[in-house]
Image (cartoon, helix red, strand yellow):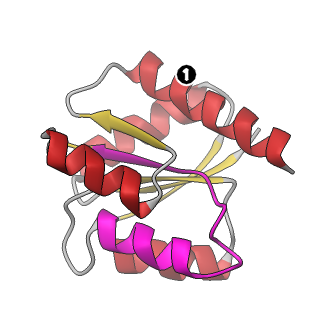
Amino acid sequence: MARILVADDDELMACLIGAHLEAAGHAVTVVGDGRAALDQVEADRPDAIILDAVMPVLGGLEALRHLRAKPGTAALPVMMLTARNSEEDRADFAQAGADEYLPKPFDAPELVMRLEIMLRKAARAL
């Protein structure tokens, strides 16, 4: 079981993601923006984060950059979810250090599969 932080301002989407991850055996915390995600990471570091790219207060891309800039969170596995699907957007996510990228809409089994692959890679890197 991994502890997953989901940051998405779409409450229904966040609940659906959380439900699928919990059904796969993971513990899930949900927040509604990037600032809240960074605060949650400081309070209780998760095993991985799923960030929506576009959120109020602080977007996912900006939150990712903050995470990568700190030694304590630089290697934390992060998956970006977004409706933004241009080649430039994908390059921005990769350049900022996203471990995974999944465009919306997506299939829940694929989300779970990619998250678990991401977690396995992180465990091997330790």
* Label 1 crowd bin: few (<14), some (14–19), many (20+), radius 10 Å: few
For label 1, the SS is helix
Q: Please state the horizontal and vertical placement of residue 26, each as a whole percent of the image.
A: 66, 38
* Position above or below: 77 against 9: above
Note whether residue 33 is visible: no
Residue 45: within the magenta? no
Residue 4: where, in percent of width, then height? 60, 50
Please say if 25 is above or below 75.
above
Q: Amino acid at mark 1?
A: Met
**Front residue of 36 and 16:** 36
Span shown in magenta: 60-81
Which residue lies at the image location 47% right of the left edge and 34% below the top edge?
Answer: 19
Q: Is residue 81 left or right of residue 18?
A: left
Instruction: Pinpoint residue 45: horizontal percent, then vertical percent.
Output: 69, 69
Residue bearing the label numbered 1: 113
Please identify the residue farthest to the right as the structure is shown. Answer: 126
Percent coordinates x, y for residue 11 in the rendering: 26, 53
Location of residue 92 with respect to 38 vertically, above or below: above
Give the image quarter of residue 29.
Answer: bottom right
Q: Residue at x 51, y 46 (%)?
A: 99
Q: Which residue is found at the position 45% from the left and 52% from the top?
A: 98
Residue drawn at x 26%, y 70% is 59
Q: Nearer the viewer, residue 97 or 114?
A: 97
Q: Quadrant of the N terminus?
A: top right
